[in-house]
Image (tube, grey):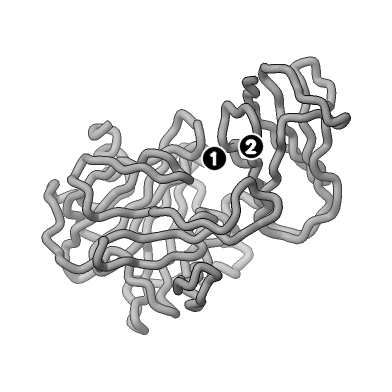
Amino acid sequence: MKKMTLLIIISFGHILLGSENSSSSNFDFLPLQVGNEWQFIGINPMSNDTSYTSFKVLTDTLMPNNKSYFEVENFYIFPELRYLRVDSIEEKVYSYFPYDDSLAYPDSEDVIFELNVPASGFYYTSWWGPIYIHSGMCKISFWPDSTSYYEYLFRITTSLDYCTITLGENIGFIEFTFMPLETIVYKLIAVRLNGQVYGNFVNISDPKSELIEDFILYQNYPNPFNSNTVIKFYHSKTEYLDLSIYNVQGQCIITLLKEEFPAGQKIISWDGKDANGKEISSGIYYYVLRQRNNLKCKRLLYIK
């Protein structure tokens, strides 16, 4: 596991200086303040295609649990990081999940990032499961000094491939990958912190700087499942969508969604029953998301 994380760090193009534990007594690895922004270039190592995306702190808001969170715009990359708060005493970052009637759970809060875990240790989250940590020092070309970093290595649902998010001390987000879905490496090219700009921002509204993918179907969670699972997808424009479940014979057993939806992310819950309300048999099934000129398909496993 440790060997894999080191290879990922080197592939990002930042200079790895050595491995050590952070000596910082303050939680400065995710400076959340309204107006702060991180911009990345996404590089496909196979085709060398590039694109741009960014994280930006929009506002701070009080949620129904009476805790204040920063709302972070991060396009479709990590929807789980939309509402964040830092607990400097516990040295943890919490993510808030607002209630959605299509989800199998109500309002909830979960730890996303921890800094009080030993290097090469791990901790568990309810959304991403176990997260493994590697720490060390790196040098970013436009940043004045070398910086300590924490790399968080995890799986998205039951995918066999890994994703990473790397936080740098006093900088915040510096690198991440989304390998199960895109095999894209994202590298920080500019950051705006407390009104000061480091690096060079790109106008990502430029047509040449489009998002890497505008139609994404994620792996269902949990998988395998035996009572309820959620299916998440993202699309970049308002259009008519069809989400259906098929058996291995290619027969449609239920249509979960068939209507026009505005652009954005949507999460659909399924209880493992067919169109007649009958519980399906154990086995492999396929869920297919269609738009006008495209479709995505993934496999799921139901176990009684």
Residue at (42% x, 40% y) in the render: 129
- SS assignment at label 1: loop
Disc 2 crowd rating (10 Å Cα; few below 14, some 14-19, many 20+) is: many
Q: How far apart are marks 1 and 2 (CA)?
A: 19 Å
Compared with 221, 175 (above or below) is below
Q: Nearer the viewer, residue 145 or 85?
A: 85
Residue occupied by mark 1:
181
- SS assignment at label 2: strand
Residue occupied by mark 2:
229
Q: Which of 64 and 266 is in front in this view?
A: 64
Which x, y percent locates residue 245? 77, 30
Which x, y percent locates residue 263? 72, 60
Residue at (28% x, 39% y) in the render: 5
Residue at (38% x, 45% y) in the render: 164
Q: Which amino acid does label 1 sit on?
A: Leu
Q: Left or right: 282 with respect to 277?
A: left
The disc at residue 101 is none
Q: What residue type is labelled 2?
A: Thr
Compared with 24, 152 (above or below) is above
Q: Is residue 149 visible?
A: yes
Quadrant of the frame with the N terminus: top left
Which x, y percent locates residue 194? 34, 82
Q: Left or right: 67 with respect to 141?
A: right
Compared with 167, 143 (above or below) is below
Among the two numbered marks 1 and 2 on one chain, the one whose residue lies closer to the N terminus: 1
Q: Can residue 141 be seen in this view?
A: no
Disc 1 crowd rating (10 Å Cα; few below 14, some 14-19, many 20+) is: some
Quadrant of the frame with the C terminus: top right
Compared with 280, 240 (above or below) is below
Which x, y percent locates residue 168? 27, 60
Residue farthest bottom in this picture: 195
